[in-house]
Image (cartoon, helix red, strand yellow):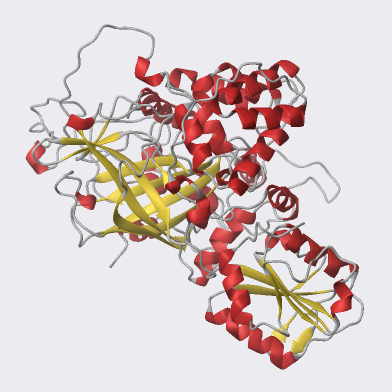
C-alpha cells in the first residue's frame, strides 16, 4: 500500500546526486566556487561579491535553537497497522478501520543533554510518535517510562532547571549525577516513583529498538455515541526490553557516542525493521475512583495486573530519514494534536503540556507556520483562516480570511460532527478556583515501593548501585541526607545501603511503606529473549581455520545475528572473508557477545582485554582455543555460566546464550 507521507515528502525533495549546475539561491549559475572576488590575486575581497555574501550569510544562520529538553534525538519513518477495530471505544478512524495503514514518524531522544551529548547516558528516553491519519495528525508524545517526576506542569521549569547543567559551570553534560537535580528530588517527594525508574536498568537501554514506550498521561477515548473511557497508551517492542550495564554504558559513551542512533539506522538499512505493538489500558469512566491510586496522577502507573494491556496494532519502522535536519530536527510534536475520538483528561501535567509544546516551537522553528514544514504537514487537506506570519509558504487566494463571512459563502466552514468535525468531550465540571492538589495525589511512596518490589535481586542491586553513583557525585551533605531520607520512606534496606556507600546520615526512624505488592510486568528480566539482530565480535588471535570460521558465520547468519571480524590488522582471510575491524576500532562494549578463535600459544594484550571485559559484563563468550592455557592467567573462568568451549559444545548453545543476553550468576 502506498505510503501517503512518503509520497508527500518526495514532492519537497531535491536529489543532489543528479548532475546539475551549481547555482545561487536565486538560480544564477555559478562559474567559480573556491575563490572570493578580489582586487588582484593578493588584494582585498570586494563587497560586491554577492555569491560570497549569500553563501556565508546562509552558513552563519544554519543552526536553529535546540530543544530545551530532548535535544539529542534520532528519527525514522514507518507504518501502523491496526489488528482489530476499537469502534466500541473510539471513533478515531485509524483505530477503527483495520484495512488502513497509517504512516508514522518516530523520534527517540534523551532528555538532559544537548544535541552533541552521548546516546548511552543514564536518562529517560523520549518516544514520540506522529500518526499521519486521514483525519489529521495525532501525536503520542511519550517516554520509555510510564510515569514522570512531577504532578503539575507549573513545576516543569523548576525541574528542568535543576536537571540541566548547573548554570555557574554548565556541568555536567548528559547526566543527572549532580547537586541541583538531587536537591530537587529531596525537596519534592512526588518524584520518588520516577526516581526509582530513572535509577533502574530502564534508563540505560541496549537499543532504542529494545525499549518500551508509554504515553505517560491519561487520555480519553470517545466513541460515536459520545461514551468515554480513560486510556493509557503503551508500545511493546517485539525484540523485548534489554539494557546495558552501567560500566558498559559509560565505555560506549566514549567509544561510540552515536551508538543508539547508529544501531537504529543500520538495522533499518539492513531490513531488520524494528517493531512495536500498540497496547491500551482502558478504564470505564464509572470505575475512575475504584483504585488505590488516582488515575489522573502522572506519577502513578496502572498496574497491568489490575488493568490489562490490550494489544491492538503494530508499528513498523521501515525507512530512514533522507535529511536529519529537515525531518528529525524540524519535526514538531504536541500532545494537543488529536483526532476525533481521542480527548484529554484533567491530568495537571498533561494540561500544561498542551500549552508548552506549541509555545516552544514558535521560537525554535521561527514562527507560527511550523505546521507547513514538510515533515509536520498532515496528509489530509488543511484549510483555515490563519494567515501570514514568518515563513508563510502558502498563497491564500480570495477576499476573506475570517469567520463568519457572507462574501465567500462562509468558506471554509466548520464541519458537522457527523462529517468528522472534532467535538470535545462534554465533561461536567464543578469546583472552586484553587491552587493545590487533590489528597488522592499525596501518596508518593506506595508505587515507588511497588516498582522496587517487582524487580529481581540483580535489578535491585543495579538500582542501589546507580543511586550510590549518582549521589556519590554530589558535593552537598544536605542533598545526600535529604535523598536518603526520601529512600527511607520507600525501602529501609535501600536507604541503609546507599547511606553507607555515600557516607550520608540514615534517619533513626524507619518510615518504609509496608507493602509486599509486586507487578511482574515491571521487571525487564521477564522479557522476550531472542538472538536476532544482536551482534557478535569474532576475535582472531593467530591464523584461523577458514572452513570452521565460515561454518560458524553461516550459523550466525541463519539466526540473523550480526558479526564483525576483529584482528590486530585488517587483512583478507579468504576470497569471501575479510577482517572488518581492528582492536583499535572495536571494543567489547559495542557487541552483545564475543567468539575468540585462538591458534596461537600466546594471547595478544588487546585480545585479552576484549575477552575479559566481555566476561566482566556478563555477556556470552565462545572460545575456540588451540591451547586453553592462553587464558589461564586471565579473569575468565572457563567453567562459568555463559562461557562456551567450542571444542566441547556445539555453536547452537552459544546462540542460546546470545538470546539469553546476560549471565548474572557468573562469579567475577
Q: Quadrant of residue 197?
A: top right
- Between 335 and 365, the one lying in front of the other is 335
Quadrant placement of the N terminus = bottom left
Quadrant placement of the C terminus = bottom right
Say whether residue 27 is visible.
no
- Between 620 and 206, the one lying in front of the other is 620
Which residue is located at x 61 percent, y 16 percent? 509
Image x and y of residue 347, in percent: 34, 26
Say whether residue 493 is visible.
yes
**Vertically, is 110 above or below 182?**
below
Which residue is located at x 20 percent, y 46 percent? 92
Image x and y of residue 622, in percent: 71, 75
**Vertically, is 202 above or below 277?**
above
**Vertically, is 338 above or below 311?**
above
645 relative to 314 in the view: left or right: right
- Between 629 and 118, the one lying in front of the other is 629
- Between 461 and 576, the one lying in front of the other is 461
Q: Quadrant of residue 643?
A: bottom right
Image x and y of residue 112, in percent: 60, 35
**Vertically, is 484 above or below 657?**
above
Amino acid at each position: 500500500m502506498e505510503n501517503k507521507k512518503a509520497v508527500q515528502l518526495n514532492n519537497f525533495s531535491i536529489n543532489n546526486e543528479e548532475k546539475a549546475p551549481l547555482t545561487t539561491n536565486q538560480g544564477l549559475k555559478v562559474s567559480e566556487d573556491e575563490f572570493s572576488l578580489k582586487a588582484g590575486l593578493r588584494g582585498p575581497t570586494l563587497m560586491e561579491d554577492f555569491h560570497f555574501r549569500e553563501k556565508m550569510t546562509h552558513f552563519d544562520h544554519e543552526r536553529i535553537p535546540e530543544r530545551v529538553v530532548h535535544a539529542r534525538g534520532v528519527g525514522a519513518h514507518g507504518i501502523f497497522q491496526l489488528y482489530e477495530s476499537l469502534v466500541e471505544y473510539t471513533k478515531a478512524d485509524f483505530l477503527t478501520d483495520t484495512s488502513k495503514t497509517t504512516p508514522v514518524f518516530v523520534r527517540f531522544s534523551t532528555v538532559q543533554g544537548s544535541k552533541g551529548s552521548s546516546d548511552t547516558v543514564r536518562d529517560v528516553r523520549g518516544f514520540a510518535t506522529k500518526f499521519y491519519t486521514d483525519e489529521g495528525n495525532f501525536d503520542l508524545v511519550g517516554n520509555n517510562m510510564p510515569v514522570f517526576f512531577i504532578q503539575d506542569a507549573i513545576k516543569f521549569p523548576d525541574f528542568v532547571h535543576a536537571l540541566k547543567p548547573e548554570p555557574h559551570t554548565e556541568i555536567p553534560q548528559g547526566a543527572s549525577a549532580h547537586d541541583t537535580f538531587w536537591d530537587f528530588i529531596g525537596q519534592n517527594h512526588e518524584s520518588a516513583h520516577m526516581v526509582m525508574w530513572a535509577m533502574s536498568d530502564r534508563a540505560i537501554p541496549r537499543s532504542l529498538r529494545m525499549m518500551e514506550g508509554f504515553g505517560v498521561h491519561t487520555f480519553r477515548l470517545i466513541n460515536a455515541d459520545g461514551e468515554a473511557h480513560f486510556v493509557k497508551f503503551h508500545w511493546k517492542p517485539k525484540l523485548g526490553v534489554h539494557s546495558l550495564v552501567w560500566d558498559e554504558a559509560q565505555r560506549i559513551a566514549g567509544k561510540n557516542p552515536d551508538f543508539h542512533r547508529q544501531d537504529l539506522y543500520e538495522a533499518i538499512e539492513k531490513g531488520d525493521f524494528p517493531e512495536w505493538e500498540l497496547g491500551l489500558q482502558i478504564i470505564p469512566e464509572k470505575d475512575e475512583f475504584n483504585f488505590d491510586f488516582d488515575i489522573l496522577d502522572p506519577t502513578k502507573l496502572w498496574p497491568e495486573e489490575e488493568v490489562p494491556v490490550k494489544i491492538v496494532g503494530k508499528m513498523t519502522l521501515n525507512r530512514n530519514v533522507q535529511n536529519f535536519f529537515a525531518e528529525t530536527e524540524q519535526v514538531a510534536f504536541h500532545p494537543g494534536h488529536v483526532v476525533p475520538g481521542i480527548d484529554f483528561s484533567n491530568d495537571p501535567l498533561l494540561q500544561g503540556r498542551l500549552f508548552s509544546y506549541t509555545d516552544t516551537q514558535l521560537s525554535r522553528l521561527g514562527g507560527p507556520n511550523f505546521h507547513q514544514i514538510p515533515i509536520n504537514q498532515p496528509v489530509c487537506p488543511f484549510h483555515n483562516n490563519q494567515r501570514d506570519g514568518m515563513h508563510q509558504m502558502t498563497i491564500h487566494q480570495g477576499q476573506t480570511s475570517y469567520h463568519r463571512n457572507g462574501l465567500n459563502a462562509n468558506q471554509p466552514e466548520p464541519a458537522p460532527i457527523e462529517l468528522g468535525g472534532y467535538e470535545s468531550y462534554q465533561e461536567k465540571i464543578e469546583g472552586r478556583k484553587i491552587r493545590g492538589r487533590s489528597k488522592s495525589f499525596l501518596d508518593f511512596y506506595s508505587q515507588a515501593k511497588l516498582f522496587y518490589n517487582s524487580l529481581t535481586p540483580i535489578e535491585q542491586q543495579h538500582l542501589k548501585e546507580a543511586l550510590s553513583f549518582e549521589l556519590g557525585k554530589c558535593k552537598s551533605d544536605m542533598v545526600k541526607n535529604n535523598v536518603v531520607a526520601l529512600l527511607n520512606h520507600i525501602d529501609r534496606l535501600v536507604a541503609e545501603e546507599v547511606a553507607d556507600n555515600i557516607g550520608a546520615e540514615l534517619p533513626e526512624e524507619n518510615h518504609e511503606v509496608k507493602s509486599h505488592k509486586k507487578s511482574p510486568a515491571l521487571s525487564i528480566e521477564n522479557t522476550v529473549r531472542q538472538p536476532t539482530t544482536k551482534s557478535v565480535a569474532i576475535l582472531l588471535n593467530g591464523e584461523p581455520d577458514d572452513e570452521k570460521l565460515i561454518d560458524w558465520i553461516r550459523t550466525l547468519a541463519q539466526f540473523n545475528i550480526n558479526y564483525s571480524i576483529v584482528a590486530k590488522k585488517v587483512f583478507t582471510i579468504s576470497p569471501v572473508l575479510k577482517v572488518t575491524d581492528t582492536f583499535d576500532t572495536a571494543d567489547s562494549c559495542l557487541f552483545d557477545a564475543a567468539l575468540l578463535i585462538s591458534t596461537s600459544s600466546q594471547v595478544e594484550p588487546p585480545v585479552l582485554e576484549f575477552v575479559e571485559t566481555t566476561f566482566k559484563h556478563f555477556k556470552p563468550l565462545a572460545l575456540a582455543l588451540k591451547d586453553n592455557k592462553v587464558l589461564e592467567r586471565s579473569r575468565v573462568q572457563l567453567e562459568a555460566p555463559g562461557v562456551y568451549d567450542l571444542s566441547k559444545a556445539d555453536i547452537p548453545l552459544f546462540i542460546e546464550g546470545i538470546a539469553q543476553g546476560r549471565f548474572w550468576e557468573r562469579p567475577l
